[in-house]
Amino acid sequence: MVSTELIIKIGQILVFPGFLFLIFYALFAEWVDRKFFARLQNRIGPLHTGWKGILQPLADLIKLLAKEDITPEAADSVVFATVPIILFAIPLTVMFMVPIIGPKAYISFEGDLIVILFLFTLTVLSVFMAGWGSLNRFGTVGGLRTSLQMLSYEIPMGVAAVGPAILAKSLSLSGIVAWQGRSMSLFLENPTEFSLALGIAKASVLALGFGIFTICMLAELEKVPFDIPEAETEIVGGWQVEYSGKKLALLRLGGDIKLVAASALMTSLFLGGPLGPWPIPPALWFLLKTILCVMIISNLRALFARYRIDQMINWMWKNLVPLSLLYILAIELMAVLM
Amino acid sequence: MKETEFIIPVGPQHPALKEPEKFLIKVDGEYVVDADVRMGYNHRGIEKAMESRTYLQGLYLVERICGICSCAHTTCYTQCIEEAMGLEIPERAKYIRVITAELERIHSHLLWLGIAAHEVGFDTLFFYIWRDREVVMDLLELISGNRVHYAMPTIGGVRRDIPPEKVNEIKKGCNVLEKRTKYYKELILNEKTIHNRGDGVGVLTPKEAVALCTVGPVARASGINTDVRADDPYLVYDEIPFNVITYDGCDVTSRILVRVDEVLESINIVRYCLDHMPDGPIRKVVSPLMRVPEAEVVSLVEAPRGELIHYTRSNGGMKPYRHKVRAPTLGNILAVCEMLKGGYIADVPIVIAGIDPCLCCADRIAFVDVNTDKRWVWTDEQLRRYGVKWYQQNS
Amino acid sequence: MAMEPELLKNLTKKPATLVYPFEKFPPVEGLRAKHMWYADRCIGCGLCARVCPAFAIELDGRGKDVKGITFYLGRCVFCAQCEEVCPKKAIKLTQEYELACYTQEDTILKFTKE
């Protein structure tokens, strides 16, 4: 017997806020990224496909799906074929643990933050496998660079993500979001001077965390200034160099979903997820906040020249790691005070 | 070769290279151990084709050696032919040639700055600089009718005059360019990520720069005061006050700054020329099918990329007996291998771009046998035959 | 970070790109583009064909019995040397610059004397 509940559940997985919604939202996010990036550079950006070129990412995807799919003779064909699927699946999995339509995510358990961080590391590993497995010289260099890069940004990323978790006393994203909503409403009910001061202190510390996390996300998403593993002018696309056709389409779609997942993480960890001060549907809050995060990322990638790998690792270990340790210290103090 | 070393081919087709050229780069992890350059992918047989064209037809062929420094090539070529014919061109024509050449230098340097920004992954700066480069392109279009291949200098003078109303527009454009270029200089000096990629990268010491015969901005960025405009003034450069820009950082940042400052200097030269341009005719009438008396002439011009040499030999006919072009890139390309050694893979594109290689200018084939020091030149056909024979024997 | 003010300033400005087929940049005066031949002025001296650096001009007939002229636009380099040498100003380069076409035959521009 098929109950309505089951149908709703299946609908949630497949349509909203599941696969279909996420894929189209990812394409929309790519469009926002491209358009905003273009406007920052005084260009127009995508224009002709649909309203203001809104269908351009979809058109690109369809075009790539129709192209010839080549596997190099020397490449490890199993690794070569599985990596795009993994890179497509991992960000989708992450998205199911992020609260979208309410304060509780579809999959939520104590410790899902750790799983998300682990999944993000897994993407790096698969990127490395892709570069190494394609047996191209540029691909090899790109794969090496990815893993080197990971060594430097992983610690600040984890530390920055753990900050809100300590304050919320919960290791699940839904718990963190719920805590943010709770403290906001507590403050609104009882605005004393002490709670205001504490709120400002908390907000400034978390803003620092947001900054650190955004920088790490730039590295995770391989955007300028940390697009070292796929630097087009240096190593011709790096680890992606041998991919074509359907596999490249999957990789690109996976990249878009990863962009959404990164901004969703930024939103849920630091910006209150789908909750907001005004009564509009939570999903809309989520969309607004993630789009804001996407815009922040595209603004940052318009602002810098690319780092060299050694400079990046140097900079990360000398500046970002100490900064994140300072940040975690402040968080601990805050937790004791509360 | 050590086990950890492998060769990365940069080119003949590579996103960092706008023209086909091959650099074989031996790397150990991220370090560049050795580099080698292969030229000749862009050989078009222009020098041979010159021999079957009249001097006037050759003018337009020479212009098409390169799209960016086309005016430098025509200026050099016309100087060559005028010298051989003993022709003195009108003063106003000289000024107009200088104006075109300097506008072209601005255009070339801004183009290069954009490319350099792109090579270090700073696409925003690339788009902004290229947007502002449109100003100078429009000025060139205004005075010559075309955005590239201006066809301004001709044998005996220039083809188009600059009337007073255009003078005002050029001055207005120069003001915009000056403002923007100063902004970019400020930006380049302040943006840390550019310094990260430029400081101490691709070092070429003054000693090496002299030994490897570098020319133009590359030599000037290594602190060598060399500029044909000052050393061996042609046209009216001896009347125009200008500074030769040198920096002694010897690295990529210096090469960027030399070019930015040269843009500013060129704007001043253009302004001076517009103010001091004498009235009078712009060209001497020369028969389009003229004969050039027997002569052997070399002429030098400071192209945007450095010293450009044209050599012509006539035997009294309507067509040159031999015409030889030595483009500035040929002087600089050997230095690239030296600059690359000891750097990182990530620095390869910006170091190669740092000399502003114009490979279509440089690709001319001449063979030197190192053992006997015998030199010879082959035509395409001979080369092809040799290639076929060589493969038959060796396979 | 030095570029941020400039970026934000440009966010509100109109993009620099022209949407080409819909918006066109007006051709400047003196642009060298498609040829025009005035049959009544031509005296058939053939100078244009002799100086053309791309060998893109063919004159049909010489002297008084000149019947027509052919410009191979695919080869032409638009240097306007033909316009310059013509003693009777019978060739003029117009400002019609949109010369892209689908077949090679379309690149051949033929004028004949009626």
Image (spheres, rainbow, N blue to C red):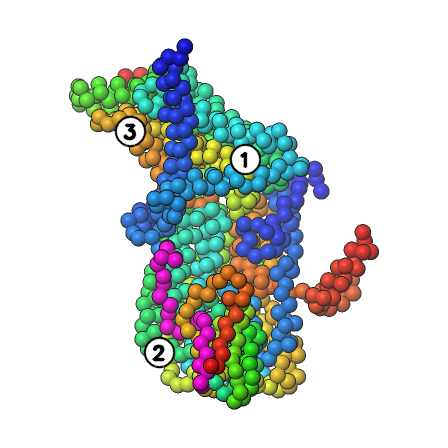
Q: Is residue A98 left or right of residue B73?
A: left
Percent x, y of residue B60: 54, 73
Q: Nearer the viewer, mark 1 or mark 2?
A: 1
Residue at the front extreme?
C114
Residue B273 coordinates in the image, percent (x, y): 39, 75
Residue B17 higher or lower than A291, as above or below? below
Q: CA distance from mark 3 to mark 2?
A: 62 Å
- Give the amino acid at mark 1: Lys
Q: Position of residue B55 (x, y in %)?
A: 58, 80
The chain letter for the residue carrying disc 1 is A
* Residue B184 image label: none
Q: What residue does disc 1 label?
A: A247
Q: Which residue is painted at 42% across and 57% down in the image?
A: B130
Image location of residue A265, percent across then percent down: 38, 27
**Boundaries of the magenta span:** C17-41
The residue wearing badge 2 is: B163
Badge 3 local density, few (<14 within 10 Å), some, or many (20+)? many
Q: Say which of B58 and B314 sits in front.
A: B58
